[in-house]
Image (cartoon, coloured by chain):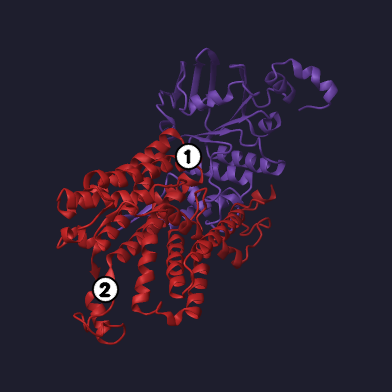
Amino acid sequence: MTSATQPTANTDERVKEISSFRNALIRPELGGIVGTVAVFTFFLLFAFDSGMFNSQGIMNWSQISAQFMIIAVGACLLMIAGEFDLSVGSMIGFAGMLIAIFSVTLGWPVWMAIIVTFVIAVSIGALNGFIVVRTGLPSFIVTLAFLFILRGFAIYLPQTIERKTIIGGVSDAAEGDWLAAVFGGKIFTGFFQWMGDNGIIAVFERGTRKGQPVVEGLPMLIVWAIGLVIVGHIILTKTKFGNWIYAAGGDAEAARNSGVPVNKVKILMFMFTAFCATVFAVCQVMEFGSAGADRGLLKEFEAIIAVVIGGALLTGGYGSVIGAALGALIFGVVQQGLFFAGVESSLFRVFLGVILLGAVILNTYIRRIITGER
Amino acid sequence: MNPEHAPIIQMKNIEKHFGRVIALAGVSVDIFPGECHCLLGDNGAGKSTFIKTMSGVHKPTKGEILFEGQQMHFADPRDAISAGIATVHQHLAMIPLMSVSRNFFMGNEPVKKIGPMKFFDHDYANKVTMEEMRKMGINLRGPDQAVGTLSGGERQTVAIARAVHFGAKVLILDEPTSALGVRQTANVLATIDKVRKQGVAVVFITHNVRHALAVGDRFTVLNRGQTLGTSQRGQITPDELQDMMAGGQELVALEDSLGGTV
């Protein structure tokens, strides 16, 4: 017991000094940071002149990335809490459809349609979570069931009510609505106008909008994405509840023994994931002015891939919201970048598969370093 | 026996039935503060049921539990924890992927207020964790070191230090040494000794007589749901303890052919 009888020594000869490189490696964001730098370097070199980095181009991939970010934040916190939600994509389609039905078919004010949709969606998230913690079934199966249930309703409802699978006319209904503007509006329009006037960003050369900047302002979609990332990051790393999220996913039984309300944490995370999916849906419906039954297809997997690229472990208990946001950024930049670079877009899927595999292998390796397993 | 020394927990004639199975058939044990009470017994002797009754997981079918002289009815483990009875489980205590400091304060996170918001006070948590670990003789690389990098013995020590830091008066250790090597076991036994000297009552469950004799003040042997009495340190030899655990029969016959004690 020599080590126990010399408490004054500051270092233990049994603990090997860890190199700063390895120390950096065990940060969950590392993969995301390296990936982001690599992706930007690549496209700056090969697609700089393609218009990808002018104001329109930047806005284009920023919006796509922001979409991924919104659902990745929810998926990330849920995955760290040890669960999955495969119903995210269907939830996007379902929630969007609800808003359209409420506001167009039923003629409710849009703000009311949005609020009621949020309540319904978050309740379904709670139901998902409740079933998972009560039955002890894998969330994979439970949410897979909801993937089909919600998608089914997203097709059935408009079919029966309107005899079509796309409901339009939301833009007209949303005109002047205060809550619709929170999701579909643009901010800093004055600043963008100023940048246009001073030649920093492109303006329309002719037509009725001559002199106006091509990019009018910062879409609320991006504001939501940044806001959710910041809030998610602070909750996870800086609060008591964040510690519970890690604990619930790291080892639910040990967490329970220490008095962490694991079931409550998990159900809340399912609700938060549903909330994020609904934010995505509302922004999309407000942007397009319509809701489609097939919206959000495969989004659940894209969210999970972004989270995994961001360094989270599929088994839970480890990960980072910032990492997931970078994963989403990589996603958006590559998807749009390949288009700008004129590469066949089907190659995007090849890229996805490759990067997913690489990320998972890297994460497993990092996990071994942290836990000291061999 | 020291007269000013009142027992902190008295378990009187505890019986526990699971359906038709009688897991405990009238067990009485007194636990004293500042002492290490070893609970010995072979597999299936009822050790786990007994400590689960003490920590509020099970309700006794018959018998009473006195805590600090008061009759106690624990509705669930949380009641027992808030009364000061903490259990450290063999495996389910620490989360390997989380840092020592996050583990240490898991479920008891310190918060500091910034405006209307409450935040996890990492500075305080890190400082306390480093201090407590130094007291227990574990030198961390830093408070953010993951628990996964600690040895099994060190993890037990962190769990014990955590329970004591959060005000445990009675510490129930469920086979803390059964999966450990010699050196790690020695570390855990040293930790038990430190905790005992702080006045905490330790209930140490083991089926290893040598581990028990190394730190125990009192020894109670359970066999088939009954106690075979409690002995104090110095009143009992290792062989007698070993015999009692095995029910005094088969082991004697085995010993000649095996050579030495188990």
Question: Against B130, is A38 above or below?
Answer: below
A291 vs B218, left or right, is left
In this figure, which residue is indicated by the disc labeled 2? Answer: A217
Mark 1 surroundings: few (<14), some (14-19) or many (≥20) residues within 10 A: few
Which structural element holds mark 1?
A: loop
Camera-side residue of B9 and A126: A126
**Residue A153 falls in which quadrant of the image?**
top left
B140 vs A158, left or right, is right
Question: What residue appears at the point 64 percent right and 49 percent down from the top-left corner?
Answer: A4
Q: Amino acid at mark 1?
A: Pro
B253 vs A86, left or right, is right
* Chain letter of disc 1 in the image: A
In this figure, which residue is indicated by the disc labeled 1? Answer: A138
Expressed as whole percent of the image width and height from the top left, the position of residue B137 reads 61, 50
Question: What residue appears at the point 57 percent right and 63 percent down from the top-left corner?
Answer: A25
Expressed as whole percent of the image width and height from the top left, the position of residue A284 reads 29, 59
Q: Colour of chain A?
A: red
Question: Against B63, is A69 above or below?
Answer: below
Camera-side residue of B39 and B253: B253
The chain drawn purple is chain what?
A: B
